Amino acid sequence: MQRGGLAVDWRFISLPMINAAVDYDSHFPAGYEAGHTAGLRLLRVAARTRAEHGRGAVRPLYAVIGARIFDTAADSGRADGDQRGTRASVEPILSQAGRPAGLADALEASSYDAEIRGETDEALALTGKDIGTPIIQFQPPSGVAFFGPVISRLPTEAQAVRLWDHVLGLASFPGFAELERSLRERPRLRSFGVEPGQARIQEAWYAGSRRAPQ
């Protein structure tokens, strides 16, 4: 990280692998299973990108994927529609990230799943299984790891540095375990129907997913 002088490495964690024994229809809102499946397909592309272009290629690819999925309005008329995890949506992402379109072949390549599962298991071994993403490990391989922080809006550069310092301070205390609340601000993302400067919208979450209004 430029302001913090930190070396950041990226590993993979797959939500459909974590939730392999979970009935999506009864535990999650509509669309979660499709989103998680698309996520695994994108992880395969990321794994191939890392293998062929180095670990430093993961961050820019991840940034383009995130902007494409989360910072684009669902009704914007973009060419890929809701085709997350398809070649039609991934090839433009690879192009924007400066990578060859042929990496999209990995979408169907289950040969990368063992590697992804291994890193998923490694992450859960650090935190326990009842968590979500992201997981950050501080000062690996022996440093503490946590799920989070989960934030709902993009901080300024100065806010990001201050927030990181606080997170690192909490993580550095050996007895720290958890901070959590289920009443949250809806993420300020266009994919959630919220513009960056829009007034705060609160909603209840349960087990990492939005609950229907009661």
Image: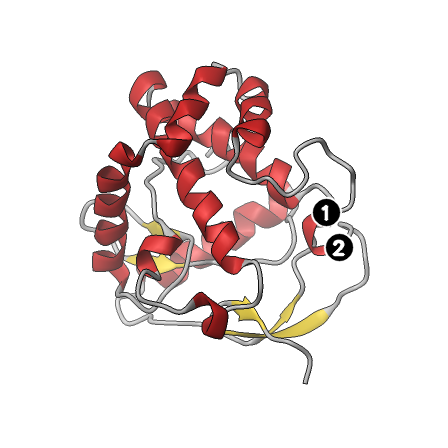
Seen at 47% across and 74% down, the residue is 26
Instruction: Say few, some or many: other residues with alpha carbon within 10 Å of mark 2 (under 14 / 14 to 19 / 20 or more).
Output: some
**Compared to 18, does 203 lie above or below?**
below
Instruction: Give 99 or 158, whichever is nearer the viewer.
Output: 99
Between marks 1 and 2 in the image, the one whose residue lies nearer the viewer = 1
In the picture of the structure, the residue carrying the numbered disc 1 is 74
Question: Residue 183 vs residue 105: left or right?
Answer: right
Percent from the top left, x then y, of residue 201? 74, 68
Q: Is residue 93 visible?
A: yes
Quarter holding residue 64: top right
Instruction: Give 204 or 112, whichever is nearer the viewer.
Output: 112
Q: Do the residues labelled 1 and 2 touch (CB within 8 Å)?
A: yes
Question: Residue 202 vs residue 32: left or right?
Answer: right
Outermost residue on the left side: it is 142
Instruction: Give 186 or 81, whichever is nearer the viewer.
Output: 81
Figure coloring: secondary structure
In the picture of the structure, the residue carrying the numbered disc 2 is 193
Identify the mark nearer the N-term, 1 or 2: 1
Question: Residue 10 vs residue 72: left or right?
Answer: left
| Badge 2 element | loop
Seen at 56% across and 18% down, the residue is 95
Instruction: Give 192 or 40, whichever is nearer the viewer.
Output: 40
**Compared to 213, does 62 lie above or below?**
above
Seen at 76% across and 55% down, the residue is 194
Mark 1: which amino acid?
A: Ala
Mark 2: which amino acid?
A: Gly
Percent from the top left, x then y, of residue 37? 44, 48
